[in-house]
Image (cartoon, rainbow, N blue to C red):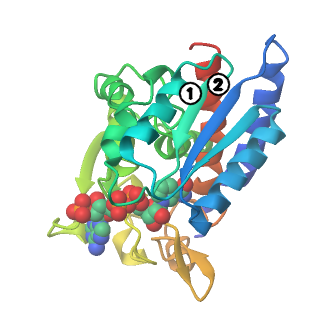
Amino acid sequence: MSAELLNGTRLAKRIRSQIRQQLKKLTFTPGLAVVQVGDDPASSLYIKHKQRDCEKVHFHSEVHRLPADVSQSALIQHIEDLNTRADIHGMLVQMPLPDEIDKEAVIDNISPAKDADGLNPVNLGNLLINREGVTPCTPTGIIRLIELSGEEIEGKHAVCIGRSPLVGKPVGLMLLNRNATVTYCHSRTPDLADQARKADLLIVAIGKSEFITADMVKPGATVIDVGINHINGRAVGDVKFEEVKEVAGFITPVPGGVGPMTRAMLLENTLKLAIGG
Ligand code: NAP
């Protein structure tokens, strides 16, 4: 059996087109600000993609580049200034930040009403009590990809491998909020393969190339591969795609699965914040 592909590139394109339609009803232009500290080339590339996405949906976007040795207080002051700007509806601080800066303190200072990444503790707290407003981009994109499969989430056994605050932990909560039964696995889980084999929905976000092999997957399962790793200049996921696709019912490719959906969800969050929803 060969799994059906969950095409994130195509779904993201459809979402951008829906955003353009919704924009026609607005009398103002949604604005996204991205704050970059230093000039890390990978971060610069990610930001360029985000700007290009904004152009595609006719959002206003700004990049605020601060020097690598900016103090934490100056960075926070910059964020507070953006919090008060009426033409900026969403903002994010591009990670990683220099070691000297307390990342959590920075995110704490992004107003929850302008938190385009959905990573402020207020928005994460709302997720915990099933009051989903602005939710983190990658987990939200994963939910959309599962919905694309047409498979019900309610009643399914979801196994999340990885428990980061960016991906694993919030996606597990989002699945739980949709009445899945959720198991979390991480680096200290002793029987990970056994747990993975029980999954109807297997979400893998660990950052280890081709870690999940066919023998760890229940036949017919939906497999969402979040990982982005590089082998000889080629992007590969956390799932051994070629063999797992023969066992799974649905599978996301890398690239072209979760990545484009993460970017589309940033646009959706910005629109949501702009219209105050
Ligand atoms: P992270 O913060 O490094 O967290 C990795 C998680 O994986 C941790 O919970 C860790 O467990 C767990 N883990 C690591 N090795 C493991 C192993 N051998 N067995 C079981 N669990 C293991 O990473 P992240 O930010 O969540 O990102 C994970 C991957 O997704 C990376 O490849 C990243 O590039 C990718 N990513 C992709 C997108 C996208 O849009 N496609 C977005 C975000 C991230 P412990 O907690 O026990 O340490």
Ligand 1 lies in quarter = bottom left
For marks 2 and 1, the one nearer the N-term is 1
Q: Position of residue 195 (x, y in %)?
A: 24, 62
Q: Which residue is mark 2?
A: 88
The x and y percentages for residue 72 are: 37, 44
- Circle 1 residues within 10 Å: few <14, some 14–19, many ≥20: many
Q: Secondary structure at mark 2?
A: loop
Asked if residue 67 shows in the view, the reply is yes
User: Residue at the location (77% across, 29% down)?
Assistant: 18
Vertical side of 188 occupied by 61: above or below: above
Q: Is residue 99 left or right of residue 223?
A: left
Residue 222 visible somewhere in the drawing: no
Residue nearest the observer in this picture, 100 or 201: 100
Disc 1: which residue: 82
Q: Point out the residue furthest to the bottom here.
A: 232
Determine which quarter of the picture holds residue 170: top left
Q: Amino acid at mark 1?
A: Leu
Q: Which residue occupies 61% across, 65% down?
A: 253
Distance (Cα) linking label 2 and label 1: 7 Å
Q: Residue at x 32, y 35 (%)?
A: 176
Indicate the amino acid at tag 2: Ile
Quarter of the image that includes the C terminus: top right
**In the rendered structure, are the residues bearing label 2 and label 1 in contact, judged by CB atoms less than 8 Å apart?**
yes
Q: Is residue 155 left or right of residue 88?
A: left
- Depicted 245 relative to depicted 20: above or below: below
Vertical relation: 79 (above or below) 259: above
User: Between residues 171 and 150, which one lies in front from this camera angle?
Assistant: 171
Considering the numbered disc 1 on the image, is that residue within a helix, a strand or a loop?
helix
Image point 71% across, 45% down: which residue?
12
- How far across and down, in percent of the image, does residue 63 sit? 67, 44
Neighbourhood count class around disc 2 (C-alpha, 10 Å): few under 14, some 14–19, many 20 upward = many
* Placement of the N terminus among the 4 image quadrants: bottom right
